[in-house]
Image (spheres, rainbow, N blue to C red):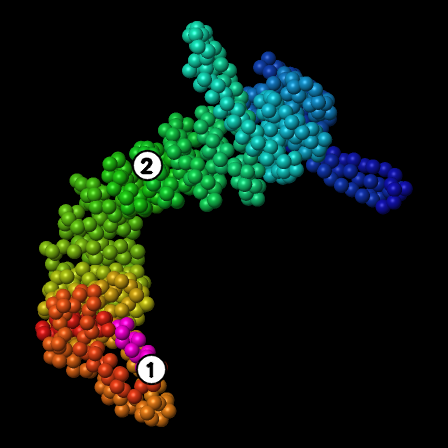
């Protein structure tokens, strides 16, 4: 469009809704302005629309105002309001008259009057004159900043103030230069920038003028000033000059104390608005990281010593936000955060208490900080808050974390935690008890003394009644933990065994059934007739089906194996297990799950239980796969698996001579595997070397080739006994630290030395034999003892 073509500008106004101003005594008229540029011929060349507002301030509105007259005056003077809307205007004015005063920022209120706030109403048109006041003396600076603060607290003016970089630059400069001179000035200017920090799109203003860094400097400076004031006040309290009148000293101290308290009150306001501003801009992780490098955690922890609830609420909220990151949490731990925050748990301020508990929840993920919480006595304080609905969820979560440590579980015994937990569990209106509550209950039940307290009276009976009614798996897990403790608590389960078996045999395989099987697996009761239970509730078929590979979830299969290990402790039940073919199912499951250490361990334990009974031992041994698997697992990486295998194989060796020889042979091969590998290597060298060997003779005619070391008659016959020429240490003049070689070792050494071996092989053989001679002697002694020689 060319400028000379434009001839006319046409404006069209479309009136929208009427409303009241959110913070001021004013009406807001919303309207749409449409502007169109017309050409010479009246055709539209360019057009645009804009949403606008007109604010009608009712300065004279008070309790004595005639609402009807004022409404008529507004309609007559404002051309945007049609006379037909007189009734609506009157209604809105009546609402303004009855509405309570609210904060001018429209979002948050710091609930403090502006220090030095003038009685006059600020006007945006006078902004330049307010800025000029910032270059005058201190009272004028405070007054000018207060006028600008009035404008900044109105969100409608923030956009225009943001664009006036001259004013914002002047405010930042005055704050940087004069914050130490006046708390009122600091408060007003920081509050202005705080109004910008409420909205994320204005954070660039704060970043541009480096207000965040300046606020941290102000906080640090004011905290240092407080320490100085406190030190001076302490000196005055102890007494001034010698010989001074005590009455005058007391008066002087009280006067200075009042001044100190007044300064502290103003400082709290400044610290609060600075902290709030930093909290708002910390929503950007990069800004938060910069604060951390400037020790924001240290400043916040120091401010915890203040007494203002409003300031403490902000400080603890900020700490809670920062504690989500490990680096900040570690900094807090170094500054003894738990000791300093523990006093706030006793506060009467509900908001402060709630955010304090949530801070403790974040900190309780650290085991060291959990120990400090116990040390400073937070456990009984937290337990006392369990019944308060507002704090209950957070308190239960903290207590759950504390209950994770075994040392802490026993400390719950000396509080009212267990009765409270039982009350909350049994009175829970929902079928499923809240997760945090059940997590705590499950952990507490893992301690024997706590389990006894839970079962006192009709505790266990009430829990079982609720479990069978609602089929709650977490509550069943709690009961399962109770059942693992030997003693009187386990005996109480006798009357519920039938109910649990009914649940298990029902055919379902959900999590509730899994936990019921776990409870039964923990009930090792000497007076319980397991054989009758298995037959009465038809559990044998269910167990066989569950042991089929991949028939059920691995967790359920594992619990079934654990149950078999418990049941197999009874001889009659063990006989039933063997006769019904469950033993073969266990072997198949072991073959399928051999990579699962927990499954392997529990299956091997069942084998151990079955070999303990004379009635079932022959059938276990005759099932060749069982001893063979045990021999293979004898050298497993898992210590517990090796231990159970060794014990079971010892039982088998004592009752079957054939398997005893095979087990001993395997142990010897494993124990001397390196020597045997060396022998095989020498044989391979002989085969490959042929006539190139020394003397032209290969190892094929040597002693090592014709006689198998493991089949040597000295190992498994009377020839294994010690020769008469060599006695054991300490008997025939030998010292205990110089154990002589065995006859077998000497003969092998002699054969090796006399054989036609290459020098390199001979040297290696001698080296290995010397290294393992002591081990061979020890193994020979063990064989002598077993042979009764």
Which of disc 2 and disc 1 is earlier in sequence? 2
Secondary structure at numbered mark 1: helix
617 shown above or below 685: above
Q: Where's residue 466, x and y in %?
A: 24, 46
The residue where tag 2 is placed is: 375
- Place of residue 579 in the rendered image (x, y in percent of width and height, measured from the top left): 14, 71
On the question of residue 487 being in view, the answer is yes
Residue placed most toward the observer, 285 or 571: 285
Relative horizontal placement of residue 240, taking residue 198 as reference (left or right): left
Neighbours of disc 2 within 10 Å: few (<14), some (14-19), many (20+): few
Dot 1, crowdedness within 10 Å: few (<14), some or many (≥20)?
some
Residue 638 located left or right of residue 122: left
Residue at 19% of width from left, 45% of height from top? 461
| Residue at x-position 19% and y-position 69% | 739
Which residue is nearer to you in this view: 566 or 219?
219
Q: Is 8 inside the magenta-drawn segment?
A: no
Quadrant for residue 531, please give it. bottom left
Name the residue: 25% across, 62% down: 640
**Does residue 552 appear left or right of residue 494 in this picture?**
right
The span shown in magenta is 761-772
Instruction: Residue 396: tell me if it is visible.
Output: no
Which residue is found at the position 37% from the left and 89% from the top? 688
Give the alpha-carbon distance from disc 1 to disc 2, as whole Å.
Answer: 66 Å
Dot in front, 1 or 2: 1
The kind of secondary structure the magenta stretch mainly shows is helix
Residues at discs 1 and 2 in contact (Cβ within 8 Å)? no
Q: Nearer the viewer, residue 243 or 544?
A: 243
Q: Position of residue 512 (x, y in %)?
A: 28, 54
Location of the C terminus by quadrant is bottom left
Above or below, 500 relative to 722? above
Place of residue 352 in the rendered image (x, y in percent of width and height, measured from the top left): 43, 31
Q: Which residue is mark 1?
A: 761
């Amino acid at each position: 469009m060319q400028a000379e073509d434009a001839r006319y500008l046409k404006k069209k106004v479309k009136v929208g809704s009427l409303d009241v101003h959110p913070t001021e005594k004013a009406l807001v008229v919303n309207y749409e302005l449409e502007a169109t540029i017309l050409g010479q011929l009246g055709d539209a060349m360019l057009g645009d629309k804009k949403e606008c507002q007109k604010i009608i301030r009712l300065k004279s509105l008070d309790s004595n105002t005639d609402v009807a007259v004022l409404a008529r005056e507004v309609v007559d003077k404002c051309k945007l309001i049609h006379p037909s809307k007189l009734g609506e205007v009157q209604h809105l004015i009546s609402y303004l008259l009855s509405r309570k005063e609210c904060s001018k920022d429209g979002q948050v209120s710091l609930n403090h009057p502006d220090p030095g706030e003038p009685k006059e109403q600020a006007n945006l048109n006078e902004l330049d004159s307010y800025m000029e006041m910032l270059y005058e003396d201190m009272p004028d600076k405070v007054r000018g900043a207060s006028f600008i603060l009035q404008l900044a607290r109105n969100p409608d003016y923030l956009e225009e103030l943001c664009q006036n970089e001259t004013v914002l630059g002047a405010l930042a400069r005055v704050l940087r230069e004069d914050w130490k001179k006046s708390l009122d000035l600091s408060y007003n200017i920081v509050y202005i920038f705080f109004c910008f920090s409420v909205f994320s799109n204005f954070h660039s203003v704060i970043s541009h003028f480096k207000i965040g860094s300046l606020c941290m400097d102000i906080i640090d400076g004011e905290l240092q000033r407080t320490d100085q004031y406190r030190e001076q006040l302490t000196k005055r309290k102890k007494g001034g000059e010698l010989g001074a009148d005590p009455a005058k000293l007391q008066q002087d101290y009280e006067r200075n104390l009042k001044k100190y308290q007044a300064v502290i009150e103003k400082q709290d306001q400044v610290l609060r608005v600075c902290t709030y501003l930093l909290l708002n801009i910390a929503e950007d992780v990069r800004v938060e990281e910069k604060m951390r490098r400037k020790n924001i955690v240290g400043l916040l922890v120091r401010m915890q010593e203040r007494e203002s609830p409003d300031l403490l609420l902000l400080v603890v909220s900020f700490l809670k936000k920062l504690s989500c990151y490990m680096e900040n949490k570690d900094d807090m731990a170094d500054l003894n955060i738990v000791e300093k925050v523990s006093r706030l748990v006793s506060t009467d301020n509900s908001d402060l208490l709630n955010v304090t508990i949530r801070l403790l929840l974040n900190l309780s993920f650290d085991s060291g900080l959990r120990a400090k919480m116990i040390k400073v006595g937070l456990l009984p304080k937290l337990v006392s808050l369990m019944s308060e609905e507002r704090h209950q969820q957070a308190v239960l979560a903290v207590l759950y974390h504390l209950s994770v440590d075994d040392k802490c579980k026993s400390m719950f015994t000396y509080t009212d935690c267990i009765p409270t937990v039982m009350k909350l569990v049994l009175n829970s209106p929902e079928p499923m008890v809240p997760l945090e509550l059940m997590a705590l209950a499950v952990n507490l039940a893992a301690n024997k003394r706590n389990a006894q307290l839970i079962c006192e009276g009709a505790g266990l009976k009430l829990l079982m009644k609720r479990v069978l009614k609602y089929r709650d798996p977490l509550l069943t897990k709690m009961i399962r933990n109770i059942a693992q403790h030997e003693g009187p608590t386990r005996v109480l389960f006798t009357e519920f065994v039938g109910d649990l078996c009914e649940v298990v045999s029902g055919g379902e395989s959900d999590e509730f059934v899994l936990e019921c099987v776990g409870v039964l697996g923990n009930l090792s009761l000497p007076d319980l007739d397991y054989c009758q239970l298995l037959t009465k509730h038809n559990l044998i078929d269910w167990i066989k089906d569950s042991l089929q590979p991949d028939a059920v979830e691995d967790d359920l299969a594992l619990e079934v194996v654990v149950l078999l290990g418990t049941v197999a402790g009874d001889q009659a039940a063990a006989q039933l297990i063997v006769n019904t073919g469950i033993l073969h199912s266990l072997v198949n499951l072991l073959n399928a799950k051999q990579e699962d250490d927990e499954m392997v361990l529990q299956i091997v334990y069942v084998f151990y239980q079955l070999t303990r009974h004379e009635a079932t031992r022959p059938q276990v041994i005759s099932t060749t796969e069982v001893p063979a698997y045990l021999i293979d697992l004898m050298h497993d990486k898992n210590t517990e698996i090796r231990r159970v295998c060794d014990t079971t194989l010892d039982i088998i060796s004592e009752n079957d001579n054939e398997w005893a020889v095979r087990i001993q042979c395997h142990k010897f091969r494993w124990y001397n595997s390196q020597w045997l590998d060396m022998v095989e290597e020498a044989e391979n060298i002989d085969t490959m070397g042929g006539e190139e060997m020394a003397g032209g003779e290969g190892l094929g005619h040597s002693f090592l080739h014709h006689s198998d070391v493991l089949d040597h008659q000295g190992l498994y016959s009377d020839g294994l006994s010690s020769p008469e020429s060599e006695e054991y240490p300490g008997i025939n003049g030998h010292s205990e630290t110089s154990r002589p070689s065995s006859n077998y070792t000497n003969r092998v050494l002699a054969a090796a030395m006399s054989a036609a071996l290459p020098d390199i092989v001979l040297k290696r053989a001698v080296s290995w034999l010397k290294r393992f001679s002591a081990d061979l002697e020890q193994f020979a002694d063990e064989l002598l003892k077993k042979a009764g020689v």
